[in-house]
Image: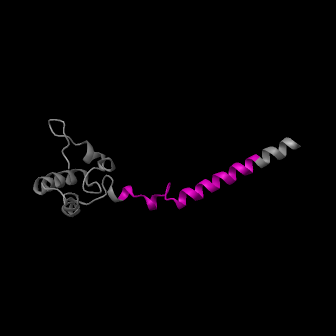
Amino acid sequence: MAKAKFFATLILALIAISMLQTMVMGVNGQGSHLNDNKSKYGPGSLKSYQCPSQCSRRCGKTQYHKPCMFFCQKCCRKCLCVPPGYYGNKAVCPCYNNWKTKEGGPKCP
């Protein structure tokens, strides 16, 4: 009888912990597609007409504005995404990150 009560209590505790974890993940924005920041920057997150404005943002602080804009727009049209920020963060957009020149350097700024 004591074993049955112990197992019933254990099962109830596990269910309670599972419910609590689900609630915490929902509050933190994890596990929910509604709060997914990747959709803002990830692959296919842009339409081709959005590329010029996103590339202006991306290339806004470089002294090499024209080449940056040229390659950024080329990459954006292919990948339909531009990483956040002025530099780096390319992992958000794998296509943008992995497109290389013939020499093996990064194609996209």
Quarter-wise, where is residue 61 in the image? bottom left
Q: Decide whether residue 86 is among the magenta residues.
A: no
Q: Position of residue 1 (x, y in %)?
A: 89, 43
Front residue (pair 32, 108): 108
**In the rendered image of this protein, does residue 94 appear above or below residue 55?**
above
Q: Residue at x 38, y 55 (%)?
A: 38
39 left or right of 19? left
The residue furthest right is 1
Residue at the (17%, 56%) spot, across then down: 62
* Picture quadrant of residue 48: bottom left
Q: Between residue 85 and residue 99, name the one nearer to us.
A: 85
Q: Is residue 17 magenta?
A: yes
Colour basis = one colour
Left or right: residue 27 versus residue 67 is right
Q: Main secondary structure of the magenta part?
A: helix
Residue 105 location in percent, x, y? 18, 39
Give the image location of residue 32, x and y in percent: 49, 58
Q: Residue at x 54, y 59 (%)?
A: 26
Query: How many discs appear?
Result: 0
- Residue found farthest to the left: 66
Q: Residue furthest top?
A: 103
Locate residue 18 relative to residue 46 in the image: left or right: right
Q: Which residues are magenta?
A: 10-39
Please give left or right for residue 46 compared with residue 69 in the image: right
Q: Which quarter of the picture shows residue 55?
A: bottom left
Residue 24 % position (x, y): 57, 57
